[in-house]
C-alpha cells in the first residue's frame, strides 16, 4: 500500500481563507479581532514562530499585537502585562510563547490569562472543560490534527487511536479530543512496554514525542492513518562545502510508514501549518464569543 498524503499546507490555507472570510463579516459589524502574542527572551525558534503568527494574523485581516520582552523581564512585570491584555477589549486572544525563561513560572503565567482569551487552550479551566466534554478553547496543534482526521475519515467513532507522547500541549489534549470523537484511546510514552505492539493495534497513530524518525513502518498496522506532529532538525551527511546537511524529519520514518499506512501527514507540510491556522480560528472564536 502507498499512503494517501494528507496535505496540511493546503488544508491550512483553506482554514485561513474561511477565517479571513469570517473576519471580513465581523469587521463589517464593527469589531476587529485582535491577537496579542507575548515573547520573553530571544530563543531563535520562538522568534520564528512568533513572526509567522504575526504575519498570518495580519493576512487574515486581524490585528496583531506583539509584545517582545527582554529575557530578564521579571515574572511580576509579565503578569502585569497579561492583566493589562486581559482588560483590553481590543484584545480577544492572548498567547504567551513557551518556553519562558527559567526564572518565570510558566504555570503561573498560563493561569493568569483570562480563560476566554486563552487561544492556546492551556489554562486549567479550558483543560478541565475539554476533559469534561464542554465548550473549551482547544490547543491548536491537536485541534489541527483532529480536523485533518475528521476530513479524511468522516467519523472516527469506534476507531482505535494511539497517541505517542503525553505532553500538556499535544499528547493529553489530543487524547481527549479523540475520546470526544468516540475513539478507543491509548496514550503511550517513554515507559510504555511493548510499544511496537501497542502501536500496531492502532487505526490512528498520532506521534508527538520529539524523537526523529522513532516510529518505523513495521510498527504501523496496514492501512492505518499516521499523524506526525514531530518537527526535528537532523544532520544528514555533509554538503560539498563540508558543512553539515540538515533536514526536517518527523517522529515517524516517513518512507517506511508511507509504504504501509493508508494515509500519512508529511513533515514539513503536514501538521505544522495547521497549528497557526487553528490559532487564528481560535482567536476568531474568542472574538465572536466576546461580542455575542
Ligand atoms: N511553544 C511551542 N508550541 C507552542 C504553542 O502551541 N503555544 C505556545 N504558547 N507556545 C508554544
Image (tube, grey):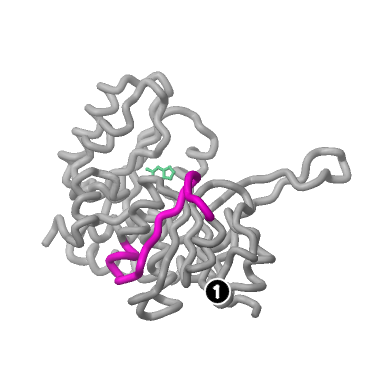
- Nearest to the observer: residue 255 or residue 288: 255
Q: Position of residue 208 (x, y in %)?
A: 49, 52
User: Residue at 59% of width from left, 63% of height from top?
Assistant: 219
Q: Position of residue 26 (x, y in %)?
A: 22, 65
- Nearest to the observer: residue 73 or residue 188: 188
Q: Residue furthest left?
A: 292
Q: Going by the image, does 6 lie left or right of 285? A: right
**Residue 7 image-quadrant placement:** bottom right
Span of residues in magenta: 177-194
In the rendered image, the vertical position of residue 75 relative to residue 135, given as above or below: above
Q: Position of residue 88 (x, y in %)?
A: 18, 41
The residue singled out by tag 1 in the image is 263
Which quarter of the frame holds ligand 1? top left
- Quadrant in which the N terminus appears: bottom right
**Residue 32 image-quadrant placement:** bottom left
Q: Position of residue 82 (x, y in %)?
A: 24, 34
Amino acid at each position: 500500500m502507498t499512503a494517501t498524503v494528507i496535505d496540511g499546507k493546503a488544508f491550512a490555507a483553506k482554514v485561513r481563507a474561511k477565517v479571513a472570510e469570517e473576519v471580513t463579516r465581523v469587521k463589517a459589524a464593527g469589531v476587529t479581532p485582535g491577537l496579542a502574542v507575548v515573547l520573553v527572551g530571544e530563543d531563535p525558534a520562538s522568534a520564528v514562530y512568533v513572526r509567522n503568527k504575526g504575519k498570518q494574523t495580519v493576512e487574515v485581516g486581524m490585528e496583531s499585537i506583539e509584545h517582545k520582552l527582554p529575557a530578564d523581564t521579571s515574572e511580576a512585570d509579565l503578569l502585569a502585562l497579561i492583566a493589562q491584555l486581559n482588560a483590553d477589549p481590543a484584545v480577544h486572544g492572548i498567547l504567551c510563547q513557551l518556553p519562558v525563561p527559567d526564572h518565570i513560572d510558566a504555570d503561573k503565567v498560563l493561569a493568569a490569562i483570562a480563560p476566554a482569551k486563552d487561544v492556546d487552550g492551556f489554562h486549567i479551566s479550558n483543560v478541565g472543560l475539554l476533559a469534561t466534554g464542554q465548550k473549551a478553547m482547544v490547543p491548536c496543534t491537536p485541534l489541527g490534527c483532529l480536523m485533518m482526521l475528521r476530513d479524511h475519515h468522516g467519523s472516527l467513532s469506534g476507531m482505535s487511536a494511539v497517541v505517542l507522547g503525553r505532553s500538556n500541549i499535544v499528547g493529553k489534549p489530543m487524547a481527549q479530543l479523540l475520546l470526544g470523537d468516540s475513539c478507543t484511546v491509548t496514550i503511550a510514552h517513554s515507559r510504555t512496554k511493548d510499544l511496537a505492539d501497542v502501536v500496531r493495534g492502532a487505526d490512528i497513530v498520532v506521534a508527538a514525542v520529539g524523537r526523529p524518525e522513532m516510529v518505523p513502518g513495521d510498527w504501523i498496522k496496514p492501512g492505518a492513518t499516521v499523524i506526525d506532529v514531530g518537527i526535528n532538525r537532523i544532520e544528514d551527511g555533509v554538503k560539498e562545502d563540508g558543512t553539515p546537511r540538515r533536514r526536517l524529519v518527523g517522529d515517524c520514518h516517513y518512507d517506511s510508514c508511507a509504504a504501509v499506512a493508508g494515509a500519512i501527514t508529511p513533515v514539513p507540510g503536514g501538521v505544522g501549518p495547521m497549528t497557526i491556522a487553528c490559532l487564528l480560528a481560535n482567536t476568531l472564536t474568542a472574538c465572536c464569543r466576546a461580542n455575542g
